[in-house]
Image (cartoon, rainbow, N blue to C red):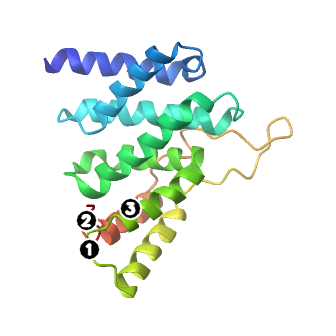
Amino acid sequence: IPRVCTLYIRLISRLVGSYPGRLVELPNDLLNNLMASLKFGIDHNILEVSHLTFEAITSLALYACNAPSTATEALRPHLDEFLKLTFEQLLFKKLDMELVDVAGSCVLALVCARQEAYGRLIQEMLAASETPLTPELNQRLANSFQHLSEAFPSTTGTRVEGGPREMTSRDVAMTVARRDVFMRFLMGVRGVLRVK
């Protein structure tokens, strides 16, 4: 039932956006069910569901960027999975252009939250490619991923209570320059990689 699905994801999106820190206090089963609902929403055929899902994941990733690492330990495996699923959606599946901005912001927030998982994911995607990676293709993909890193927000600048400044949704918003970098990344990688 599309209407119920949309309302359910809208509710979860609002909960995650408003209370991301409270999620880690939930019992494991409930947290896993909420995260499974978000995973389901990434590749949903209802555009609003996917849009709301990416917004919720962005809120969760921003919370993980700003919170102490001990507070986000339970979220790490979920954030890693969201990063993987989001890249798969952007690079290997049918992509609605209306989702590029919100999915791009989601990627930026996830990479900020899980930088080490991002590095592993790149290596896994390159290793799983069905396309024979000639030195030229390998260099092209490396350049595309390097170019994407230019869009990542910087945490330097204004300090809050002696630590790095907090990341906000404005830091990962798709500006014209970021959108240009992100679209060049998609054009440089999408279609070159075919995953086994």
Report the side of 74 relative to 6 (left or right). right
Residue located beneath label 3 in the image: 125
Identify the secondary structure beneath mark 2.
loop
Marks 1/2 in contact by CB < 8 Å: the verdict is yes
Q: Which residue in the protein does label 2 denote? A: 194
Q: Is residue 86 above or below residue 118?
A: above
Q: Is residue 108 above or below residue 23?
A: below
* Image coordinates for residue 12, horizontal then vertical, percent: 39, 19
The kind of residue tagged 2 is Arg
Residue sitting at x 55%, y 42%: 170
Residue type marked 1: Thr
Q: Where is residue 127 in the image (x, y as percent from the top left)?
A: 39, 67
Instruction: Choose the circle earlier in sequence order: 1 or 3.
Output: 3
Query: CA gap, disc 2 to disc 3?
Result: 9 Å
Give the amino acid type for the residue marked by disc 3 in the picture: Met
Helix, strand, or loop for circle 3?
helix
Q: Is mark 1 on a helix, strand or loop?
A: loop
In the picture of the structure, the residue carrying the numbered disc 1 is: 131
Q: In which quarter of the image is the N terminus?
A: top left
